[in-house]
Amino acid sequence: MATPRYRKARLSATPDKQQLLTEALAREGEAHRLLLEGEDESARVPLREAAELYRRSWESAGPRSFGRLIGIVKTSVLAGGGAEEAAYVRRELGDDADSPTGWYALALAALVAGDDELARRSAEEMREGGEAFARTADAIDALAAGARDRYAAALRAIVEDFETRDQHVTGVAIADTAAVLERVAAGRGIAAGVTSPLLPR
């Protein structure tokens, strides 16, 4: 298999990498507010713009800025897509993500692509990232396995964790991880149907 892009020598990071990330977070935050207001259609434009900004930020940042890849997948799934972006992330990472955050990005991408074996393997690897990673790994593994009850329990744990937080990456109180997984689960017919003020209507 071709060497993953993140292992190749890159040009030095360009000065605008942080600006691109800041803009991505701003657009994602705008979309999150719209989603929580039930404005799914209106949220799609800023979500797609955020995905593109995350991609550009990844390509101009250091080779281990895996959070940007997670952002690409999350925003594209919430925008109603994700297949093309998941394929992009898989090309960038190959089969070895090399860190819990990288494995998380690969697990999401594999899940969206329907590669459940890779999603489950990646979920197991991402557990080393801590409790939040482990909770998400539980949900991804259950979803990939088609284990409805186990997935619902894992999703509730994710939502409950978000409900205790007083800080959110985009500045908007939303359980975006759960929202993304529910979009994937809905496509597989096993959505948990968890309700929370932190989830889209």
Image: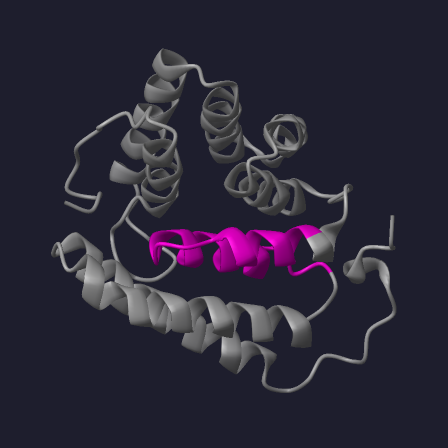
Say above or below: 187 vs 14.
Answer: above
155 vs 9, left or right, is: left
* Point 72% across, 68% down: residue: 62
Q: Position of residue 120 (x, y in %)?
A: 61, 26
Say above or below: 48 vs 84.
Answer: below
Where does the magenta region start and end? Answer: 64-90
For the residue pair 124 and 185, the one nearer the viewer reads as: 185
Task: Residue 39: name its quadrant.
Answer: bottom left
For the residue pair 82 and 153, the one nearer the viewer reads as: 82
* Point 42% across, 77% down: residue: 23
Q: Position of residue 91 (x, y in %)?
A: 72, 55
* Point 40% across, 38% down: residue: 184
Q: Is residue 131 magenta?
A: no
Q: Identify the coloring.
A: one colour
For the residue pair 146 and 102, the one nearer the viewer reads as: 146
63 vs 159, left or right, is: right
Say above or below: 20 vs 111.
Answer: below
Our reading of the magenta stretch's main secondary structure is: helix
Say above or below: 152 vs 31.
Answer: above
Residue 69 visible at all: yes
Q: Position of residue 101 (x, y in %)?
A: 62, 46
* Point 87% across, 54% down: residue: 2
Q: Is residue 68 magenta?
A: yes
* Quadrant placement of the C terminus: top left
Q: Position of residue 122 (x, y in %)?
A: 65, 33
Marker count (numbered): 0
Residue 70 visible at all: no
176 vs 134, left or right, is: left
